């Protein structure tokens, strides 16, 4: 994983270095290089590897996804959204560069992600499928809708079903997209199953965030803890407690693994990702 993540990091830096020098570019690089586990781009490339294909040809697709994810974090941290001061263990983009530059840095990452895919030498129909998947997952019927629901439901009592809906759109759509992008490249007939695996992993991932926001610390997480409570957000832990929330995480990861075994692939490579996420502490 470390080798692949290093390749992703180097490629992200190379991509942005091609653009003219500017404060916005500096802010984009700052947020991309602030750390992060690169889970989403790693999933893309690991799915491709699971089908015994050469992942090196598709690093730019993985980078495009990471750029979308990083843009969402920059905007999420803004005063008008979650108003956070710390991200990936460093000052958030708007704290470092100012609010206006942070907004433009997020906009830049969002827009350039599509240009990176367009510039690849992949077949046009595959490019369209990849762009469609990525931008539907991150757009108004995906992540942005989830962010809207999240904001609208602050200070409100929620049911588990409503909370699942928010998590499905805000986190699950983009995480599931990582599995789907790999499937579109390596085995389009399996995209439906990979999509479902992604949704289960995405929901488990978000419930873990709810748990870690209660039991972890800022140094370990690289971002403020207790932010859900300070923003008056209902979470899995406020609804059913930490212990029951962890049981739900375990259940979802087990269901995802069962789906992995229904595919004709190198199962271990995908299960490795799931187990890595299952054991995460940040």
Image: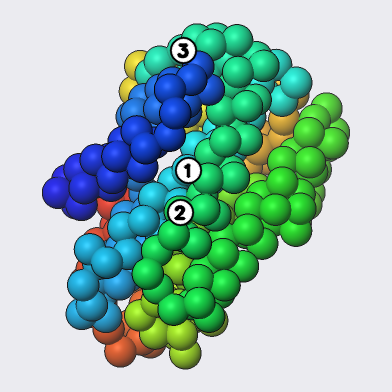
- Asked if residue 275 lies left or right of residue 172, the reply is left
**Residue situated in front as seen by the camera: 193 or 122:** 122
Whether pointer 2 and pointer 1 mark residues with C-beta atoms closer than 8 Å, the reply is: yes
What residue is rendered at 36% in x and 25% in y? 34
- Asked if residue 54 lies left or right of residue 111, the reply is left
Of the two numbered discs 2 and 3 in the rendering, the one whose residue sits closer to the viewer: 2
Dot placed on the residue nearer the N-terminal end, 2 or 1: 1
Label 2: element kind:
helix
Whether pointer 3 and pointer 1 mark residues with C-beta atoms closer than 8 Å, the reply is: no
Position in image of residue 36 (x %, y %): 36, 34
Dot placed on the residue nearer the N-terminal end, 2 or 3: 3
Position in image of residue 130 (x %, y %): 52, 69
Q: Which residue is mark 3?
A: 91
Q: Which residue is mark 2?
A: 116
Position in image of residue 232 (x %, y %): 74, 24
Label 1: element kind:
helix
Question: What's the distance in space between the residues labelled 3 and 1, CA to CA?
Answer: 18 Å
Q: Which residue is mark 1?
A: 67
**Residue situated in front as seen by the camera: 72 or 127:** 127
Q: Quadrant of residue 136?
A: bottom right
């Amino acid at each position: 994983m470390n080798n692949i993540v290093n390749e992703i990091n180097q490629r992200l830096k190379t991509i942005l270095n091609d653009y003219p020098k500017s404060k916005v570019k500096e802010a984009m690089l700052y947020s991309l290089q602030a750390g992060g586990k690169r889970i989403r781009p790693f999933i893309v490339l690991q799915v491709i590897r699971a089908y015994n294909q050469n992942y090196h040809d598709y690093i730019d697709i993985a980078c495009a996804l990471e750029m979308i994810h990083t843009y969402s974090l920059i905007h999420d941290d803004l005063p008008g959204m979650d108003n956070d001061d710390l991200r990936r263990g460093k000052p958030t983009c708007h704290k470092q560069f100012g609010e206006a530059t942070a907004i433009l840095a997020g906009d830049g990452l969002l827009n350039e992600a599509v240009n990176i895919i367009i510039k690849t030498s992949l077949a046009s129909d595959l490019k369209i499928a990849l762009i469609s998947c990525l931008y539907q997952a991150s757009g108004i019927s995906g992540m942005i809708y989830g962010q809207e629901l999240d904001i609208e439901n602050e200070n409100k009592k929620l049911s588990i079903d409503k909370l699942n809906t928010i998590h499905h759109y805000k986190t699950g759509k983009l995480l599931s997209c990582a599995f789907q992008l790999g499937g579109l490249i390596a085995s389009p007939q399996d995209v439906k199953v990979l999509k479902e695996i992604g949704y289960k992993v995405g929901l488990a991932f978000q419930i873990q965030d709810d748990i870690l926001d209660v039991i972890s610390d800022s140094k370990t997480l690289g971002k403020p803890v207790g932010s859900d409570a300070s923003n008056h957000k209902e979470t899995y832990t406020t609804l059913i407690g930490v212990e029951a929330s962890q049981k739900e995480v375990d259940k979802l990861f087990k269901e995802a693994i069962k789906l992995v075994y229904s595919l004709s692939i190198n199962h271990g490579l995908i299960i490795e990702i799931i187990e890595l996420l299952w054991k995460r502490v940040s």
